[in-house]
Image (cartoon, rainbow, N blue to C red):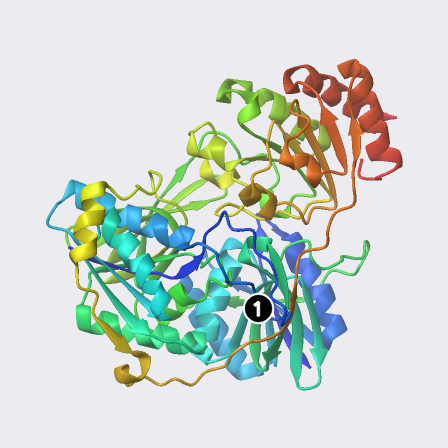
Amino acid sequence: MKILIPLKQVPDSTVRVSVAPDGKSIKTEGITWSISPYDEYAIEMALERKDDDPSTVVSVVTVGPARSRDALRQALAMGCDEASIVIADEAIPPVAIARALAKVIEEAKPDLVLCGKQASDDDQGFIGPALAEVLGWPHVATITKAVPADGSVELWREVEGGHEVWTARLPALATVHKSEKEPRYPSLPGIMKAKKKEIPERPFTALGVDASGPMLEVLSMEPPPARGAGKILKDGDPRHLADQLATALRDEAKVL
Amino acid sequence: MKVLVVAERKGTELRRVSLELAAKATQLGDASVVEIGGERYSPLPFVSALAKKVQADAPDLVLLGATQNGRDLGARLAARLGRAYAADVTEIAAQGGSLEITRPMYAGKVRARMRVPLPAVVSIRPGAMRLREGAPAPQVTKIEADAAAEKLTFTKFAAVASGGKRVSLAEARVVVSGGRGLKGPEHWNLVEELADALGGAVGASRAVTDAGWRPNEEQVGQTGKTVTPDLYVALGISGAIQHLAGMTSSKVIVAVNKDPDADIFKVADYGVVADVFEFVPAFTEAVKKVRST
């Protein structure tokens, strides 16, 4: 089985994001970049299938600036077999990114495509469903488990009160909410192997896909409003503190 | 502006977010509300039915709730119709021939004001739009999901034993979350009893869901759910930046932690420096008392 994961490089989730002087973007100097967390779950999910069946081939692809190559290298070090990059330095309409990925997928012919449910920079969650739409494939959103069977895959989707289990004939696409285990860390041999692997690249324009599509324009960015200093209750009998808090929530905050 | 609201139902009731959208849509212009009937949500039958409706009615704007299904349906619909798409929007206004919206980015660490060209598909975060109490119930037109478009097979529903009886986390007006400070899943009755006393939903920090103490669906924060309740109560949660990203937009935040330097206190309106095992049972009783008087 061949599994392909489109991934995006984003600021690491531990980065304290701040707005750049232009007021429309974030400061990128000196920040650590990583694979977007949900894409990491998708990679882990694919690698768990490869643990079960070593003939599984797991590839990763990204459409983005040249620095994204580091994220692909990270995925190879985790245990992915192959990686490629479509270089896009300028902002491209999201639907055109979906078209570029669809082109890569039509060439690579994977059985299963796993996308993180959303990238943790723009948090739009558009690319997965849009990619399935461009491909004309069915998709299942926000899965937590994929169990391949003969010519099909069982996809588990966490919903309120339990899991819906769907069966999709291959090829199919799913967006990933979580993997069963936490994403694995790259092993030292994995890192050494990843260093030697070729990462083929080509420019977006070489794909020959339609680059048009609607785009959102950022007018301004700001940090979320700071919360005022709160009240601290301490040094008392727990029962007394509890009464004080309950009364304050009713009379001051008016939420009870 | 012509606006089409896509309503969702939970059981027999319209979801609160659908009412919020319907109310907002009437402010934006000429509004109508549609609901897609089908046994359960599935992308292709729902997109197919909704796309036909949108092509027939030609609304400038399609509004959905930024729920698990709404976000999925909205994205695929926008791709099918070549419309602009914005997800999880918290403010929206018509501005000339386009929309001006506000939405969180970078897991809530930044708020972006953006221009969205029309025609567009927008999903709105539950709780972000005010709902006037006593507003008239919206007129809902029902269309049927397009079963012929289905390419998937529904196999089964695997229910989890717990949950179900409480309100859903993303829409709850009160959320009580537990962290590692509770020391183990056997102590979750403390969280649940307080949640029940407050009429709220139960959440958890990532450390807790990763440890398998609680199901993933209860995780609040980056890679979990973002919640914006009127009252958020964090019990034994230290306040990692990823957790804060999922709850700092709550109206009132209460934190209980025995470490006075815990980061959670930086965002708390009311911080209680105390042992959760001593404080929480007393607080649950105090809440019951205050609510009954």
Please give the name of the residue rendered at 13% of the width and 44% of the height, measured from the top-left corner: A53
Residue A197 percent coordinates (x, y): 17, 59
Please give the name of the residue rendered at 79% of the width and 13% of the height, measured from the top-left corner: A237
Figure disc tally: 1
Please give the name of the residue rendered at 72% of the width and 67% of the height, measured from the top-left corner: B24
Q: Residue furthest front?
A: A30
Residue A134 percent coordinates (x, y): 34, 75
Quarter of the picture containing the N terminus of chain A is bottom left
Residue A186 percent coordinates (x, y): 27, 44
Determine if residue B42 is in view: no
10 Å neighbourhood of mark 1: few (<14), some, or many (≥20)?
some
**Of residues A187 and B290, the one drawn nearer to the viewer in this rendering:** A187
Vertical order, B214 against B39 (above or below)? above
- In the image, is A30 to the left or to the right of B195? left
Tell me the SS state at disc 1: loop
Q: Chain of mark 1?
A: A
Determine if residue A112 is in view: yes
- In the image, is A218 to the left or to the right of A208? right
Vertical order, A33 against B63 (above or below)? above
Disc 1: which residue: A25
Please give the name of the residue rendered at 46% of the width and 27% of the height, measured from the top-left corner: B213
Q: Residue furthest left?
A: A55
Q: Quadrant of residue A96?
A: bottom left
**Of residues A189 and B167, the one drawn nearer to the viewer in this rendering:** A189
**Of residues B51 and A233, the one drawn nearer to the viewer in this rendering:** A233
Which residue type does callout 1 highlight?
Ser
Residue B161 percent coordinates (x, y): 45, 29
